[in-house]
Image: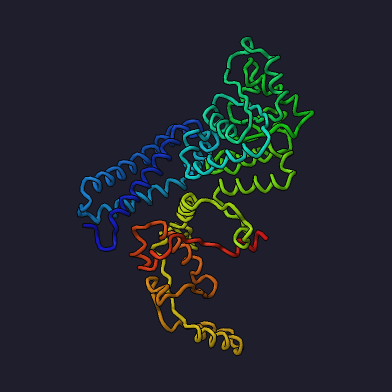
Amino acid sequence: MFRQGVNCDKFLNDVQALRGKLLDFQKCLPASEQILPSYEKEGLKAHVNDIAITIDCLYHSILDNPSITQVADEVSMLHAVRALEAILVDRRCLKFAEYAGENCAVTQQQICDHPLYSTFNLSLASLKSSFRPVTCYISYAPDSTSFVQQLKNDLDAAGIDICIDTSFGPEANRDLSKLQQEILSREFVLVIGSIEYGTKCRESRPSTTRDEARLISDRHHSQPDRILKVLLTGTCLKSFPIALAERQQHPLDFKSRDNYFSKAFAILEKLFESQLTKPELKTSFLAVKNRALNTLPATFLFSSAAADPPSLPPLVQCLRQSYQKFRYLERFIDMTPVPIEESFIQLALVQEEEQKDKERQTFSTFDHNSFEAIHKPKTVITLHELFQKDKTHLFIEGRAGIGKTTLCQYISYIWTKPELRKEKLGSWADRFELILWIPLRNLLQKE
């Protein structure tokens, strides 16, 4: 049996999460050989493999025998976590992880596996029925094929007529007049910047990519607002032809999978720009965008006129994903991550009459050091005792830094773990199907 207080299922989930993190990390290792000396790369690889063996043993031992005796397994897990965290801030790791991040394109599979994708995809069809079709040519290099295929599918779903050339042969096999006609006849041209795209544009030997880049560069001189840049890998200077890299227009950054959905709508907004001058179409577009991204605009919280809100299941999934980031807190001094479950927040219940009495004392005292005396808790309670006696709303107050925000984050995080709700929060947690944490400070800052 695990020692008291250790949840075996949670422990197994933690091990699985750590395995996933390590697998992602190991995928980046091949890229390290291009920027690290061989001895550094081999040392780092051996270190990572040692941790992988430890984690794998933990995983299988728990799977084979969930009631296995060992607190030692838990200790091994802690050591593995710390070792992996140490590697993640290792100078060598940071160096090649940055390289890998710049040079590994987001793939079609990664986009489709994202929790937001199903909602995003369903929302695109409503644009197709509302807007006039727009034509667009996509120029890219072979290293971006998977990403471009997904982007094409999504733009097609929104009613954009996409043209791409999938042949990457030498110039001798190309009909340049036809290629020029395609690029000039389309309303917009989308250039997918990548390391390979930039390299091929600068090569002396003929290629489809070089031909396209030359024709697109010619067009941008007369119609710069019709050329849209997307940065998939590398940097602006490395990934675009010189004529486009020097333009003031910043590219849309698609390096991260999480950026895909918001940036895809930025592309659509540009493609539909001339039609969005009509107020009804602008309103329709923003409603579809908000629904697809599962975000509620600040005005939605205060306006009964906001129609067509996101469906509940995708919103719940989005909230859960968002609240997962509260799993760890950072220590103030050394910034090391600490599980939020280990944080300590003492609550005190103050009745309404007591609260009014305290407010009167606050305004009648001149002793600036008497805050603690006036607001000294009278009845210490636990989280399990919140919402007792049919309370419907609570007001939490305390001096800055005492843990008000941490408490909200803790409750939000525990809500994402159904198996822990009753244990950590008590029976009242089952009364609420949804928890919305709204930092009002952020709304005020946006205004």
Of residues 420 and 35, the one nearer the viewer is 420
The figure's colour scheme reads rainbow
Of residues 343 and 228, the one nearer the viewer is 228
Up/down of 96 relative to 396, above or below:
above
Residue 340 in the image: state x and y as whole percent. 42, 61
Question: Can you say which quadrant of the picture contains the N terminus?
Answer: bottom left
Residue 220 in the image: state x and y as whole percent. 75, 29
Identity of the residue drawn at 47% across and 83% down: 351
Identity of the residue drawn at 65% across and 20% down: 210
Report the number of numbered marks.
0
User: Of all residues shown, which one is farthest toward the right?
Assistant: 222
Of residues 97 and 324, the one nearer the viewer is 324
Residue 284 in the image: state x and y as whole percent. 65, 46
Up/down of 136 relative to 258, above or below:
above
Identity of the residue drawn at 48% across and 58% down: 335
Identity of the residue drawn at 66% across and 12% down: 175
User: Of all residues shown, which one is farthest toward the top?
Assistant: 172
Left or right, 216 with reference to 116: right
Residue 141 in the image: state x and y as whole percent. 58, 25
Q: Image quadrant of residue 172?
A: top right
Question: Can you say which quadrant of the picture contains the C terminus?
Answer: bottom right
